[in-house]
Image (cartoon, helix red, strand yellow):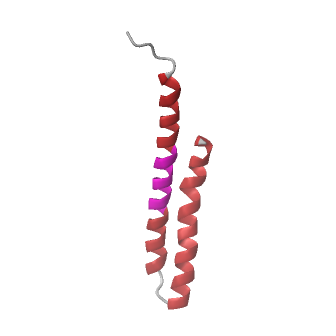
Amino acid sequence: MLSTIPFLMVVPPIAGVLIGRFIDRKLDTQPAFTIVFLILGFAAGVREVAIVLKRANDRADDGDKGDRRTP
């Protein structure tokens, strides 16, 4: 699960650049949409990494609860 983090940090910005360049070429607005979609791609990647880390942390916490003894 944690091995997907590098993938999540690389793919969304690349997808954002590709989508932005496509729109920029169609509308002849270099580099406006490329920059916007690059930023959105980074934001999406960071959001997904945060979700993965939260899930991993929740799973680790659930595993720890069974090991703890209450006084």
Q: Residue 50: horizontal and vertical position, in percent?
A: 46, 48
The residue positioned 59% from the left and 60% from the top of the image is: 11
Q: Which residues are magenta?
A: 42-52
Q: Can you say whether 52 is above or below 42 in the image?
A: above
Q: Residue 42: horizontal and vertical position, in percent?
A: 47, 61
Q: Is residue 10 left or right of residue 61?
A: right
Q: Is residue 47 left or right of residue 11?
A: left
Residue that extends furthest to the left in the rendered view of this protein: 71
In this rendered view, identify the residue nearer to me: 27 or 69. 69
In this rendered view, identify the residue nearer to me: 19 or 66. 66
Give the dominant element type of the magenta stretch: helix, strand or loop.
helix
Q: Can you say whether 49 is above or below 64 in the image?
A: below
Q: Residue 48: horizontal and vertical position, in percent?
A: 50, 53
Q: Is residue 63 left or right of residue 39?
A: right
The residue positioned 52% from the left and 77% from the top of the image is: 20
The residue positioned 44% from the left and 13% from the top of the image is: 69
In this rendered view, identify the residue nearer to me: 10 or 68. 68
Quadrant into which the N terminus falls: top right
Q: How many badges with numbers are in the image?
A: 0
Q: Is 5 part of what is drawn in magenta?
A: no
In this rendered view, identify the residue nearer to me: 10 or 8. 8
Q: Residue 52: horizontal and vertical position, in percent?
A: 52, 46
Quadrant into which the C terminus falls: top left
